[in-house]
Amino acid sequence: MRAIVTGGAGFIGSHLAHALVARGTEVHVVDNLTTGSRENVPPPAELHELDIRAEALEQFAAQLGPDVVFHLAAQADVGTSVKRPAFDAEVNVIGTVRVLEAARAAGARVVFASSGGAVYGECERPAREDDEPRPLSPYAASKLAGEQYLATWNRLHGGNHTSCRLANVYGPRQRATLEGGVVAIFLDRLRDGREVEIFGDGNQTRDFVFVGDVVEGLLAAASAPAAGVYNIGSGVATSVIDLYHLCSETVGPEREPRFVPARPGDLRHSLLDASSAARDLGWRAETTVVEGLGRTWDWVRAQ
């Protein structure tokens, strides 16, 4: 199999590229290296320094002829999307349209990394794929728009593109400088002996899913018999304050955080029901938060 991974020099994308290489897939990484790093790209995967918004993407894909395009490149910072919504839409909407057209030129399937932690909005119970989306940020709206473009291309061009709504992904190679990487931020600050800030009261809950499990979910989606939308999450709610204490216990010795005002656009509760992925894809998250934190800390302290 031949695959393109957009954003393959970044956090999730590089783990996916490694997994594909291990399976014997010919991997081509498309990344403009704005946030990604060429050191993350595994040999023998080939890095193509190209922006997903570029018109050249379609010709590149047509000449390469991939079987599948994993689309992970994105503007992923909620705060940036609030401050610069047009830029967010340019990358996440226009960029996704470019990827879809590139895949169409190559006759390839697209697996799109959407955000279940964003598109559903506030969750009073584990969110299911048929729940009404209620995005609360431009970032969330742009991810939902990307999903709708995939669905439209499926109807218009007879494609079988699939969207995966990812929960809060964490693991090795996640950068503490990027919003959303709360595990990376906590572990990075604890390692350096710096004070940790928690936005709000810490009782907000999230569905934290380990990056290795997410990669298996994306691979399963690429092999699904038909198009669809799937939640990829652990189904376990963990409060931010409990997460902090787990991180602190992992690093040791435990220290108290500092609480600061909540940020606009942040959700109170976010949790995914991944039973459809279990039923249709045979996928379940296997890594507990404690296990995942241990693996992530091994990587963080080695940096």
Image: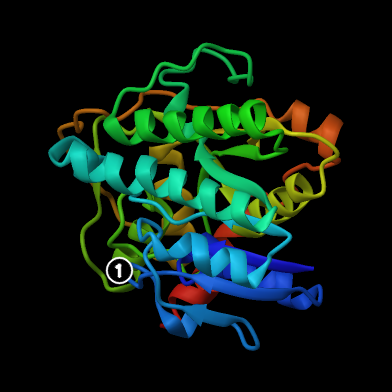
Q: Would you identify the image quadrant in which residue 119 lies?
A: top left
Labels in figure, total: 1
Provide residue 12's location: percent of width, then percent of height: 53, 60
Name the residue rendered at 47%, 21% in the picture. Answer: 120
Name the residue rendered at 27%, 62% in the picture. Answer: 177
Q: Would you identify the image quadrant in which residue 46 lies?
A: bottom right
Q: Can you say which quadrant of the picture contains the N terminus?
A: bottom right
Q: Secondary structure at mark 1?
A: loop
In this view, the residue in front, 199 or 41, is: 41
Q: Which residue is mark 1?
A: 34
Name the residue rendered at 26%, 48% in the picture. Answer: 257
Amino acid residing under circle 1: Thr
In this view, the residue in front, 118 or 72, is: 72
Picture layout, residue 197 above or below residue 204? below
Residue 301 in sight in this render: yes
Picture layout, residue 118 above or below residue 78? above
Crowdedness of circle 1 by 10 Å Cα count: few (<14), some, many (20+)?
few
